[in-house]
Each structure stands twice: as C-alpha cells, then as structure tokens.
Amino acid sequence: MDESFLHTMPAGEGFEAFRSLDNTSDTMGNMIRTPSLDTTTVVAKILDNLGDTTTTTSSSSGAAGRNSIRVWNKSARDYIDMKLMKGRSYIVGYDVVRPYLEEGRGIPSGVVYYYYHHCLTLPVMTEFKKAEELFDRLLESHEALVTDHIPNGRDELPSNKEDLEQYNEFEGLIHECGNYILKFKKRLLDGSRKNPDAAAVYGPKMKAKVEGLIERYEEVYEQYEDIIQPLFEHASLQEKDRLRREEERRKQDKKDAIEKDVQQRAQWAANFDKTREEAERAQQEREAAEKERVDAQNAELMAKRREEEEKIRSMDEDTKICTAIKEMLECNDNMTIAQLRMHLGKLKEYISAIASTPEDDQLRTVRLANRSFNDNIGCLPGAVLFLRGVGFQPTIDTNKSHDDMIRFIKLKEPDAVKDWDYWQTWQKRLENYVDFLSTFEAQMPTSFDAQRLFINQADINADHIIQLWHDTGITTSTTSQ
C-alpha cells in the first residue's frame, strides 16, 4: 500500500485516540499518523483497493451506497451521499469522521482520513511529494550552475548576467527546500522521543524515504556552503550593491520627477492665471467696444426713426396710404409677385380680424419687433405705413424708456357709448380697407409664370392702384380725431 499520499502535521494530543479507533486494519493503523483532532477539515483518500465498501457516519444513519460516503451537511441539517472515486482525494467535513471518534467505531479499510490545514478542491499533493519535486528542481538548477555558470576563482566575477541569475535561482531553491527538510527532521525527532521503539510519525517505508531525501539535500547543501557560495559571494555582494544603488537612483529620479512636476504645475498655474487675466481684460475691452458700437448704431437708428416719425406725423391719412402703395410696388425689388400676394393677404386678414372683434385691445396692439408680425406683414415695405394710414399710432411700453428700441403701434377704438354713430363709421371704414386690399390683390397676375416674377418685372402700375384707392371713396376727414 502506497503511503506517499499521507499528510502529517505537528504532533498533538489527539493522535493516539484517532489511531486506536482503527480496528479493521493494523496496516492502516501504522500508516495513520495524524496527531491533532482540533482542525475542522478532513481529507478522505480513496485507495486503489476500494471495493464494495459502505461507509456511514453513525449507526442510525444507514448505508450510503457503494463506493460512497455519507456526509453531514450542517446547513441542510441532514446527511448527503458523496460518490467517491478510486485513487482520488476529497475534502470532507470533520463531521464525517467525528462519529467514529466519538462512538469508537472502526474506520473502513478502503478509506483513510487525515487532517489537512487548507480546504482544497483539487486532489491533494502531500508535503513529501512537494518536497521531492522541489528537490528535483534544485538538482537541475545545481547541475546547470556547476556546468555552465560557475566562476573559475573566488575573486573572479561571473562572465555574464545569466551566471548570477542562475546562482540566485539555485540559492532560492536551496532555501525553499531547506524549509521542508527542517520540518521532516523535527517530526522524526519528535517521533523518536515519544515512541523510541516505533516510527511514531512515519511508517517504515515513509521514514526511509524522508531520511533519504534529507541525506541527498545535505550533500547538495554542503557543496553550496563550501564551494558555490564562496565563489559567488563577491559577485553577489556587488550585485546587491548595484541593485541598491539602482534603487536609490530610481527613488531619486522619482523624487526629481515629482519636484519637476510640482514646478511645472506651479508654472502652468501661474501662466494660466496670467492668460486668464489677459483673456478677461481682452473680453472686457471687446465688450466695451461692442457696447460702444451698438450704442452708436442705436443712436443713429433712433435718430433716423425720429426723423421718419416726424415725416409720417406730417402726412394726412390719405397721403400715408398712397405712399405705402408706392413703397410696396416701387421700393420692393427683392420680392416676387407670389410673395406680395401672400403678405397683402396677411395684412387683409389682420385688419379684418380687428373689424370683427374691435373690443380685443391686445389684437389692436402691434409690437414692431415681434417675429411673427415681421414674417407675415412687417417685412413688406410700406405695410407698417399702411397701418399708420388706417389709424395706428405709435405708443411706448410703460416699462421702457422713450428711446427704447422696442416700440408699439396701436389702433385706438372710439368710445361707442359716447358716439355710437362715429364708432359705426370707424368699423365700416375698417371693412372698406379690407375691400380695397382685396381689390389691390386682384390686380396681381395669376399665371404660374407671372407669380415667379419680381415686382419690378411685372406690369403693375402704382398710380393705377392709388386711383383704385381714391375710387373707394374712403375719406379721412370724418374719422380723424
């Protein structure tokens, strides 16, 4: 029976109690050397000779089945069956073997339990096997070092960097392997003290393997200590000094980089503040210049508007209408016949709406800067003057100064209570304006090709339209108040 899978741990008080429970196999009793019962994890090794073994955790739990083990599940508070495979290692809870320990029952010969510190989920590799594999790597590294990389003399440095790297690898392996050897020696010593007549920690075969590994390691370590280490000691010290200086240089470079970064950031901050101040000053200058330009432009525009307003105020209503007709037809080079018809239609609709609901004060008030008004009516040259002829008068928003650019025109409704006849005449006059605009619109050519002509290209005579206006018989004397 192969013992190499067995995992042993430092001696403890529970070893004899655990060993004494194995009543089925004296061989297994000699194999089990698990000294402590206070761990919480147990590993079950299924041996190659596992047959129809049935394992249960207590006399009352019943059989778990062929090649399986019944395990107590704490969270489910019930037993579960775990199928076992030959030659594999499993992690199971300590409760699996606790009933055997508490009730004095024998552990089945096909299953060996032993304690393990870590809860692995892969097949268990024992300490001895790990030590053997590590020692094999140590031998390979030793052979490569002695064959190709060792210096000729104690004061001679290695010929290249790979020699020292190989030595460092070998030195690391020999120390790592030495940790296992120290463990094995301590266990052998502890076992001989407690039970001088028997291998209390390892069985005979395992003891021989462990002692053989220790002997071979000591041979290699003796060469390391007497020959290899002295040859590389000088180079190793130099390499350590080089690494130390390199680390110091790296730290200094890092410190210098940090200081440089701090200085750069401070410089950037100073430059940023300076640039920001310059940008703010330039922006203020631009804003001041722009304000000065806008103020001058507004002043010029207001002066022009005052001049125009004075000119309009000097006209009677008939002159306003006639002048508006001339502006629509003679000062309108960029508008087509179709556009003129559309804007005349909007003007007619607006006056018609006032005639229908004259009591709507908001409808009779026009904000000259209103976008919708300008898109539909205000963009037509002469349209605002035509409204002035209808009776609209300029007014100032009470929240604005008299020189404000936002101006209003408003058509004042007569007081029907004071003078009903006059109010009726005023409303009828609005309807007459609507009829005239319909007549004006009817003078426009209607063919598709003519619609695309510009006004100055069409055969429309302003004097003819003015005559049509006079023919309406609308007088201004009866309504001007």
Image: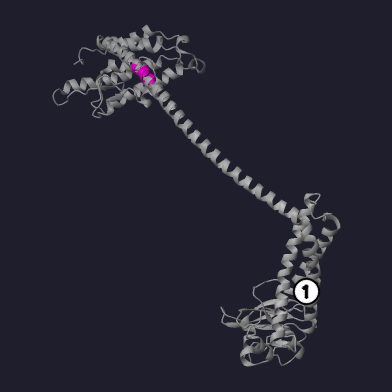
The residue lying toward the viewer, choosing from 24 and 273, is 273
Q: From this viewpoint, is residue 341 visible?
A: yes
**Residue at which label 1 appears:** 214
| Residue 340 percent location from the top left of the image | 42, 17
Left or right for 272, reference 186: left
For residue 426, side relative to residue 287 (left or right): left
Secondary structure of the residue carrying tag 1 is helix
Instruction: Report if residue 140 lies within the magenta region.
Output: no
Q: Residue furthest right?
A: 147
Look at the image and say whether residue 290 sits in the magenta stretch. yes
Numbered label tally:
1
The residue nearer to you, when weighing 479 against 245, is 245
Residue 276 locus on image (x, y percent)? 44, 30
Spot occupied by residue 166 in the image (x, y as percentages of width and height):
78, 56
Q: Amino acid at mark 1?
A: Ile
Residue found 34% across the figure and 22% down from its top? 348
**Range covered by the magenta-colored residues:** 289-295
Q: Where is residue 147, by image quadrant?
A: bottom right
Question: At 51% across and 18% down in the image, what residue appears?
Answer: 448
- Camera sees residue 2: no
Residue extending furthest left?
418
Query: Which residue: 78% across, 74% down?
Result: 214
Q: Main secondary structure of the magenta part?
A: helix
